[in-house]
Image: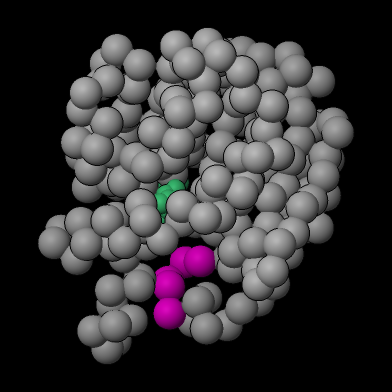
Amino acid sequence: MGKTNNFFSQCAHPQGRMGRLMLLFMNHGHASLTNWGLSFANIRDGMTMLDIGCGGGATLKRLLKRSRNGKAFGIDISEESVAKAREVNRSLLDKQVFVQQGSANKLPYQNGQFDLVTAVETVYFWPDLPNCLQEVRRVLKPGGQFVIMVEVLDSDSKWTDIVKGMTAYPPEQLMKMLDDAGFVNTAVHRKKPSYAAILGVNP
Ligand SMILES: C[S@@+](CC[C@H](N)C(=O)[O-])C[C@H]1O[C@@H](n2cnc3c(N)ncnc32)[C@H](O)[C@@H]1O
C-alpha cells in the first residue's frame, strides 16, 4: 500500500502518528457535511446527545454549540480518537462532554438515555449494521432522533478500494435499514457533490 493510501486507510480506525494527523484532517474536513446534516435535526437547549464514531471530537463541539446546557457523549472504537476528542473538548470534559472507547454494536449506555444520536462518516465501518441500529434505538428516548451523515455513497470504488473493511451504502438502503429497524419518519436529504443525511425517529 502506498503512503497516501496508507494515510487514508487510517480513517477506519485512527492509530499512532498518522492516525492523529487523520483526526485533525477529519475534524476540519467534515465540518461542512456535519453542519449541513445537523441542520435537519431538531436540536434544542439542554439535550443529551451521543455521537458514535466521534473521531477527533469536532462533532461534539458542534452539537453543544446548538444546545445550550446540553450534554454531548462521544464513543469511538479507536483509543487515538478518544484521546483527541477529549483534548479538543478539554474545557468541558466530564462536565458537558463525556468520551469513552467502545463500539457501535455494544453501546455502554442505558436504555432511553439520548434525545439525539449522530453518526458522521462512520457507519461504513460498523460491524453488523442492523444490530447497531437496534442499539441506537435502544439508547434513544421515545421521540429521539438519529442522523447518519455520509459522503461515500454507492460503491464508490475509489474509497472502498483504499480503505479496508469499508462498506459504502446507498442512502436509500440506509433509510430502508432504518425502516426495518423500526425507526419512523425516516428521510433522506442529499446535497451535491455527494452529501447525504439519513434521518429516523425512535417511535
Ligand atoms: C472516518 S472517521 C469519522 C470520524 C468523525 N465522525 C468525523 O466526522 O470526523 C470514522 C470513525 O469511526 C470510528 N469507528 C469505526 N468503527 C467503529 C465502531 N464499530 N464503533 C465506533 N466507532 C467506530 C473510527 O475509529 C473513526 O474514528
Q: Judge from the rendering whether residue 14 lies leftward or rightward of residue 26; answer left or right.
A: left
In reply to whether residue 73 is colored magenta, the answer given is no
- Residue at 82% x, 44% y is 187
Q: Residue 20, how many percent across, how many down?
A: 20, 56
Secondary structure mostly taken by the magenta-highlighted segment of the chain: loop
How was the colour assigned to the protein in this rendering? one colour
Question: Closer to the camera, 136 or 43?
Answer: 43
Q: Is residue 41 above or below residue 172?
A: above
- Residue at 22% x, 62% y is 21
Q: Residue 107, how many percent across, how many down?
A: 48, 28
In reply to whether residue 163 is colored magenta, the answer given is yes
Q: Is residue 49 above or below residue 36?
A: above
Q: Residue 153, how many percent across, how many down?
A: 66, 68
Q: Which residues are magenta?
A: 162-166
- Residue at 43% x, 79% y is 162
Q: Is residue 50 visible?
A: no
Q: Judge from the rendering whether residue 185 lies leftward or rightward of residue 164; answer left or right.
A: right
Q: Is residue 79 above or below residue 99?
A: below
Q: Quadrant of the N terminus?
A: bottom left
Q: Residue 181, how many percent across, how many down?
A: 77, 36
Q: Is residue 64 visible?
A: yes
Res 22 → quadrant: bottom left
Q: Quadrant of the C terminus?
A: top right
- Residue at 75% x, 24% y is 202
Q: Judge from the rendering whether residue 187 lies leftward or rightward of residue 61; answer left or right.
A: right
